[in-house]
Image (cartoon, coloured by chain):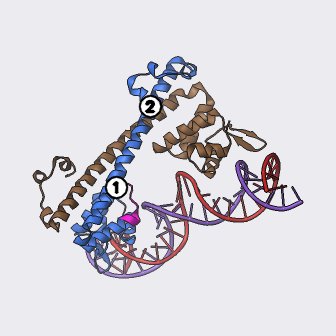
Chain colours: A brown, B blue, C red, D purple
Amino acid sequence: MYTIGQVSEMFGLPVSTLRYYDKEGLFPNMRRESGIRKFDDKEIEALRVIECLKKSGLEIKDIKLFMQWCAQGSDTYSQRKDLFIRQKEAVKAEIERLNQVLDMLIFKCWYYDEAIKAGSEEHLAGMTPENMPDEVKEAFK
Amino acid sequence: MYTIGQVSEMFGLPVSTLRYYDKEGLFPNMRRESGIRKFDDKEIEALRVIECLKKSGLEIKDIKLFMQWCAQGSDTYSQRKDLFIRQKEAVKAEIERLNQVLDMLIFKCWYYDEAIKAGSEEHLAGMTPENMPDEVKEAFK
DNA sequence: ATATCACCTAAACCTAACTTTAGGTCAATA
DNA sequence: TATTGACCTAAAGTTAGGTTTAGGTGATAT
């Protein structure tokens, strides 16, 4: 059982953010004592899941839905599982996209390395992959 | 030499977005003919870089800076390279973060699989890694 | 000749996810 | 007793990255 200030410390989140999450319905049936929020283990675990789902790209309103499913009990297991499957695929896709971006960035680092060495970019204009180090070739498409 | 409509098609970006980028200074000294924007190869290449830097998490105002460096010539090679190095590290870090999120999501998929099989979550409360498949263990921390 | 189409601008609008502000309660400390 | 500190609310403000609107120009198709 923690106060909002303690939870803020634990998670490194501003108090205002926790209040905002609560207002958005991310902690359905959180306890209160004379108006003051009491974060139980259930809310702490919820917050961990919130952080995870947020990082996976889910919006607050959809996280709210998930939390409502949790409050509804075992009838919603498969909806919850499906959500996690969707987010899993979304994160996989995002990682793939970022790996392509990474290739391009690796190429650009090499490109400017060469440009700095030569003092100009001119010789880099009609470049073919043969003249590039292996790690850079991939990025050339 | 392309019109804004052609570039919109090529990149799958709304015309309004291209105008917005221009207004934000992402195409310094783009040509115009009687008021109408002309996208040359330089701008097309710029747009490719813009897409990459955006996906790497760079803000528009910093992309604008980069484009100004490009317009300034060879004096700014090392600043440009440093930027790409920074973004490369940022993307690497982001990929790592997402891999952790992915672990958690894999765990949750397994968790709800078990819960569905058993009809309840009760037996999952005091779980230790031994009872989990290999791919799931990592996510348990 | 008129209507449509692609282009233009400035300015208002939009959305998500917070953050800030202004004002208030209550308990403990100086 | 007065003030500090942790909590509360409702409502307004903020930011990034666009999108939409309203009004205008000029070339081509009917």
Residue A31 in percent (x, y) is at 71, 37
Q: Quadrant of the N terminus of chain A?
A: top right
Chain bearing tag 1 is B
Please check the rendered image and state whether residue B61 is part of the magenta-colored stretch, yes or no: yes
Residue A126 in percent (x, y) is at 12, 61
| Depth check, front residue: B14 or A122 | A122
**SS assignment at label 2:** loop
Residue B124 in percent (x, y) is at 54, 22
Disc 1 packing (10 Å; few <14; some 14–19; many ≥20): many
**SS assignment at label 1:** helix
Vertical relation: D24 (above or below) A64: below
Residue B111 in percent (x, y) is at 49, 26
Chain bearing tag 2 is B
Residue denoted by label 2:
B139
Question: Which image quadrant for residue A65?
Answer: top right
- Do badges 2 and 1 share one subunit? yes
Q: Residue at x 27, y 74 (%)?
A: B72
Of callouts 2 and 1, which one flags the residue occurring earlier in the amino acid sequence?
1
Vertical relation: B119 (above or below) A114: above
- The reply to whether residue B6 is in sight is no
- The reply to whether residue B138 is in sight is yes
Disc 2 packing (10 Å; few <14; some 14–19; many ≥20): some
**Label of residue B87 in the image:** 1
Amino acid type, callout 2: Ala
Vertical relation: B97 (above or below) B38: above
Identity of the residue furthest to the left in this view: A130
The magenta stretch is B56-62
